[in-house]
Image: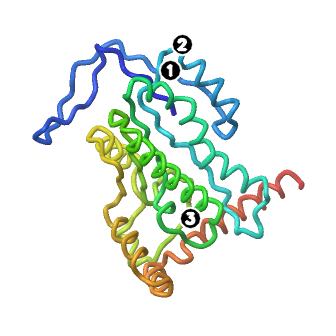
Amino acid sequence: MFFPPPPPSSGYLRTAGNGEEEILPHCNLQVFTYTCDVGKRENVYLTAERVRKEVGEVSVLVNNAGVVSGHHLLECPDELIERTMMVNCHAHFWTTKAFLPTMLEINHGHIVTVASSLGLFSTAGVEDYCASKFGVVGFHESLSHELKAAEKDGIKTTLVCPYLVDTGMFRGCRIRKEIEPFLPPLKPDYCVKQAMKAILTDQPMICTPRLMYMVTFMKSILPFEAVVCMYRFLGADKCMYPFIAQRKQATNNNEAKNGI
């Protein structure tokens, strides 16, 4: 997603030093939309050039595209694995290469990477998705270190790692029923608000809900077998299996309907 800088008369949410939020006056807001296959670098570069010509330079880049195959590894077609890696991971390279040069010239900008909690810890059955999100987290962290090493303190970076978001992308995913009331799927609006707060306050990273910090910490210090026990207690070890079963059933129904 490409966000050009707002015109001077635009309105936006600002967080004051005392933590209070205020809405600044706005008028004549314009929204520009472009269709782009971010998994193809040529499309990204061409679209970026159009954005620069038709709108102007981009000061905030939000990488948010994501897909999931919904197959166990040995049942997943190679082309779906490649698509997951191209959209979820490789696209971040292309969009950043397209817009970072100008940010470096003026030492101003913000790069936001929307990853996933599955980029910090993994689970069974979604190897391609986890690999792509782990790759994105590594890319973001390395880029952040590079900007710090170059002393480009005017370019901010924010890593967003949400838990399961209720968009239908992982419909059917279930953890232990006794735990579900404490870890329900997150509402998209809530995730957006939390991400916006992190961006406006220049937070380098945000996990939603905060419990994800604890899970990540435990995964980092506990031996693997202890992590397995924790996953089994939470029901996270096979949480994707119902989701994969639903995707498989939907695929079979679609094939039967079309006479395949």
For image coordinates 57% across by 34% down, the residue present is 97
For image coordinates 43% across by 78% down, the residue present is 234
- Observer-nearest residue: 140 or 48? 140
| Mark 1 neighbour class, 10 Å CA radius: few under 14, some 14 to 19, many 20 or more | few
Q: Amino acid at mark 3?
A: Gly
What residue is shown with label 1?
32
What residue is shown with label 3?
172
For image coordinates 60% across by 49% down, the residue present is 89
Residue 225 image position (x, y, % from top left)? 50, 87
The answer to which of marks 2 and 3 sits earlier in the sequence is: 2
Q: Which mark is residue 150?
A: none
Residue 8 image position (x, y, % from top left)? 30, 14
Q: How far apart, in angstroms, are the residues tagged by discs 1 and 3?
A: 34 Å
In which quadrant will I find the C terminus? bottom right
Q: Amino acid at mark 2?
A: Glu
Q: How far apart, in angstroms, are the residues tagged by discs 2 and 3?
A: 42 Å
Q: Are marks 2 and 1 in contact (CB under 8 Å)?
A: yes
Residue 91 image position (x, y, % from top left)? 61, 41
Q: Are marks 2 and 3 in contact (CB under 8 Å)?
A: no
